[in-house]
Image: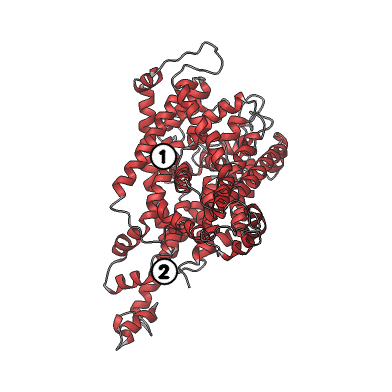
Amino acid sequence: MTATTATTATPAPTATGLPRRSPSADVRVRIRVKRLVLYTVLVSVTGLFLGPFGWLVLSGLKTQGELAASPVHWLPEVFQWHNFADAFTQIDFLGYARNSLIIALLYATLVTVSSAWVGYGFARLDAPGKKTLFGILLASMMLPQMVTLLPTYLIFAKLGMVDTYWPWVLWGLSAAPYLVFLFRQFFAGLPRELEEAAIVDGAGYAQIFWRIFLPQSWPVLSASFIIAFTWTWGDYIAPQLLLSTDRTTLAVAVMTTYVNEGGTPVPELQAAASVMYVVPILLIFLVAQRGFVAGMSTSGLK
Amino acid sequence: MTVDQISSVADRPGAAADTGRAPAAGGPRISMTTRRHRAFYMFTSPWIIGFLLLTITPMVYALWLSFTTFDGISPHWKYVGLGNYRELLNDPVTWDALGRAGLFAVTSVPLSIAAGLALAVLVNRPLKARGLFRTLLYLPAVVPPVGAGLAFKLLFDPNSGATNGVITFFGFDAIGWLADPYARYVLLMTVLWAAGNVMIISLAGLQDVPRELHEAARIDGASAWRTFRSITVPLLSPVLLFQTVTGMIASVQTIMPLLLAPLGDTSGITTVPQSNYLYMMHVFAQYFALGRYGYASALLWVLFVLILIATGLIFKFTSGVVFYNVDPEAKK
């Protein structure tokens, strides 16, 4: 970047006033102070952002008494590691986790394949009405889901699909606009030669999609799967509406079932349980983000 | 992100492949074009059918319900025309809830965007461990709502929460954060915790801002703030517009007040403090606590129309301001 300025300012490279070589001590001190301020701000802000989650973990390690006490106990007297084990036995944690996993895997798999399928149609094929349909697809991303979810609940109740996983199957099969858009962008960028040879050979479009396009799209497939999985794992309201207490997901269970027989909440177990509920999602993100963030960062950096 | 820009890319492969009709001998009977048209509908049909059945049908059903007194149980429901809408307009609770939702939208959305943008600018500098800072700042946005709600409930617990711990340490009185009138601030902070979402999308946009522009501005002696206002913000404006619209739609639908409320009965709606009783909470109360499906459907349709109007207004008032030069597809 300094090179570009230097070439435009032809006679003297230092004419721009940028400190290029051996800046004065005064400037160096100022740069150092500036950097110190920058890192102080950055570290404090990051600490502030991690604080709530740290507090959640700490709360999961306290006794019930410590969680009710005033003034605050900053740290637990003794770290109550057994809270994490107790959170498993207080409710059927694994059962709910299995429900969450089934629904999330079911939905993420179906919606990824269906969105890729629809995305291929929008990217590589055409027909009268395509522009309108694509406009509707984009606009439907802005539809408030709550407005459709509540009447959907009534319809599913009528069809006897409440307390089954059918709603997630149907949602999965019908593709998600955001993911369709993601796939469409990817497929539209692939070279035309990819399908031309296959068409000449008389292959059908479905064959071209499964054999040629899908195997090319691993990065998008995995991104779509992770996004859809995270949505479903994190969703509270749909399982709360559609599933009974036994068949519901971990999100609902963590939120509502950590109470004693008397109905009093057990906050330390709830905190421990929610840490175990959140951590898998954080891990998935940490593993997957390398490609995610790198993909976005490469565009403008050298 | 206009439709035309996007679909012009899509037309490319199709338009070029349009040249050849199928050869007369030995080829398929129907023309290539017809084949492609059929294939298009074969490929898009899952979404089309799903959209009709799972989006349009529920909305039309809700519209029909909104003209009735249907409650799911009583067989004696009847058609009341605009009765529900008339009741809704005369219900002060509805207006209060709508006002709170509007206030929440116009505070939480700009604050989230400002915070996200500030974070983006901060971590877009050449830093040591920049990737680590980005990851850590984005991490809260990945935490599911249930986890976020519980974390903030514990953090702002009036007795044992860290916030009151700090406040009393400095000699001030403890604050009843989770009750009226403070609960709204906790709600706001919980939502702001996910500002990393805006950060990550703005970062992608920031990296498309040509370096030469910043260089030129610096040589001309522009201050950092001036550069930010005159270069960064205009070039990011499509991203910011997108964030405003989606943020607004998300904010009126938030169920966070429910997750921040004390654990009460199963619906939880009765324990939501007044100041967090947003429009969606009102809908929930009518739907589930009272089973007034007809009235709640009217509430939903009013919300839907209001969102449409708000979106239209946002687009209208920003049409001259938003600057489309950055590749619109840069926002991931």
Q: Residues within 10 Å of mark 1 (few under 14, many from 20)?
A: some
Q: Secondary structure at mark 2?
A: helix
Circle 1 marks a residue in which chain?
B
B218 lies left or right of B47: left
The kind of residue on which mark 1 rests is: Tyr
Q: Quadrant of residue A124?
A: bottom right
Are the residues flagged by discs 2 and 1 from a single subunit? no
Q: Is residue A12 visible?
A: yes
Q: Secondary structure at mark 1?
A: helix
Q: Is residue A41 visible?
A: no
Q: Residue at x 60, y 50 (%)?
A: A117
User: Can you give x and y, in whole percent of width and height, for residue A32 in the image?
Assistant: 40, 72
Q: CA distance from mark 2 to mark 1?
A: 33 Å
Q: Nearer the viewer, residue A176 or A82?
A: A176
Q: Is A174 rendered above or below residue A198?
A: above
The kind of residue on which mark 2 rests is: Arg
Q: Residues within 10 Å of mark 2 (few under 14, many from 20)?
A: few
